Amino acid sequence: MEKRAYKERIIYQIYPLSFKDSNNDGYGDLKGIIEKLDYLKDLGIGMIWLSPIYASPLKDNGYDISDYYKINPLFGTMDDFDTLIKEAKKRDIKIVMDLVINHTSDQHLWFQEALKNKDSKYRNYYYFRKGNGKKPPNNWNSAFSGSCWERVPNEENMYYLHLFTKEQPDLNYHNEEVIKEVENILKFYLDKGVAGFRCDVINQIYKTSLDNGKFSLFSRGREHYENQEGNFKILERFRKDVLDNYDDVFLVGETSALTPKIGQEYIDRRALDMFFEFDHAFCKSFKLIPIFKKPFYKPKDLFKPIFKWQKEVSWIGAYLENHDQLRSVSRFGNENKFYKESAKALSLFLLSLKGTIFLYEGEEIGTLNYKNLTYEETNDCMAKNAVDSAMKILHVSKNRAFKWVNNTVNRDHARAPFEWDDSINGGFNDGHKPWLKINEHYKEINVKNEENDANSILNFYKQMIKFRNNSETLKYGNFKEVSSNNYVAKFLRKTDKESLLIVVNLSKKFFKDKKLDESKEILISNYNNHEKNLLKPFEAIIYKIK
Ligand code: NOJ
């Protein structure tokens, strides 16, 4: 297999608003990230993916960019960014940018010009269309609730397209100039030395037509803009025109609504180097139907989709958490009785998978969802829209709607300021009210506590990361599922030289297995006292097969 940096290094995602606030204004910033580079080096990661740091009104926390060539002043300056690249390089850490090009912010100059002047060339940077009688131009839905058309102020029956919030107008990829603009953005950051891009909703950028979508309650129109041939062609052009001129750089796509076959096609055509699948992220581990006390979840619901992708594609971005998901220990682990065990089991599981491993800030200390976040304290635009829609469509009270949204899709659980220590605001800053409230558990769950505890989740992550960094088999070996039941996963990672068997129990149950330890040597495990042929609750082991 071809050796590439992105295949060997663990990538750590930073949500800049929440990582470290160096100037005590309530928002994380680039200087804060620079301060913590030694922490990241010590953790063992090899790349940092920065969620968007560009100029933005932050309607969707940076996924609404108003200037691709400027850094949001809340985060610092372009000089700070250059320093970050330089300081990271000194520590052999590469930087990956978030590329958000399906849409811009409505505050972007292009869109502002397009609004001001019908004859401006920027009109054609976006989708402006006449309404259909009194209705919008088509029946598509926005991913963030409601129609994806917004009326243009002061113009008769004119709308613009936005697949996300109305402050995020979609760019028109039928326009050659838009493609050129994006190529220039890519070049600008590659020239600064970034190692690649995480490409936001990248399989939706090309709209083949604006015809009405097939009937569906929430996602009408997708057949016209998901994984279209035009989409592949644009990415192939980025590769040929730009990426191929740089050494060892890569694209990872954020791609919902994918099948393994289509995913593999992105890789085979070099449209993307890898992608994130969402099957496991949508597995039923949260309470989708609020009247039931517990979710109908079994660990197999997590294993099954992950293994499907492990088997069927040649490479993948493997993850359990990111800034859009609930915290993994709260979803798949056990917050109470087996907190540490379950967090470590998830760590061993993730870090044994095939593909590039993506960790999200806080995952390494086993941070959890908020226990008591209120609607008023919520910042997430998607969660707020979902509450409004639930109230309108289901006629439920705000409280009920929020409870449901908060348990299922409120992205703020992942966005709480990072817990560095037990001082005020968890050491995120020196006491200024943070943009989002600090998680209640910061006195117990924080980096400082865990650094001082040999048995902590953080120290286990460090051990596991080191193990993976030194293991050719985990980095480049094949994946083979051996047997899994509802609670325990077993899989092999294999090269010509070595076979590793990974056994992970993601439940509270004990399992006896006469052959568990037969002809095997334990290389790493999350229990210090493994008992022969017995798998304890949330016990996870990597064996070498003799
Ligand atoms: C996916 C990003 O991960 C999410 O945070 C954002 O809201 C949407 N794309 C829109 O850009």
Image: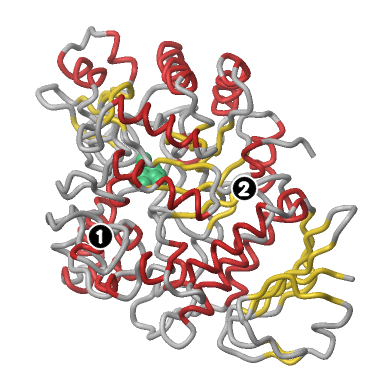
Which residue: 58% across, 68% down?
302
Residue 328 percent location from the top left of the image:
46, 67
Which residue: 84% across, 62% down?
499
Q: Is residue 311 above or below residue 512?
A: above
Q: Quadrant of residue 46?
A: top right
> What residue would you read off at disc 2?
356
Q: Is residue 345 above or below residue 471?
A: below
Q: Nearest to the eye among marks 1 and 2: give it.
A: 1
Residue 115 percent location from the top left of the image:
18, 19
SS state under label 1: helix
The answer to whether any part of residue 194 appears in the image is yes
Looking at the rendering, in which quadrant would you find the N terminus? top right
> What residue would you read off at disc 1?
427
- 71 or 427: nearer the eye? 427
* Left or right relative to 76: residue 37: right
* Left or right relative to 469: residue 143: left
Residue 337 percent location from the top left of the image:
45, 88
Which residue: 53% across, 47% down?
11
Which residue: 67% across, 61% down?
352
The answer to whether any part of residue 224 appears in the image is no
* Left or right relative to 463: residue 119: left
Q: CA distance from mark 1 to mark 2?
A: 30 Å
Residue 252 percent location from the top left of the image:
55, 38
Among numbered discs 1 and 2, the one appearing first in the sequence: 2
| Scheme by which the image is coloured | secondary structure
Q: Is residue 118 above or below residue 498?
A: above
Judged from the image, the quadrant occupied by ligand 1 is top left
Looking at the rendering, in which quadrant would you find the C terminus? bottom right
SS state under label 2: strand
Q: Is residue 404 above or below residue 125?
A: below
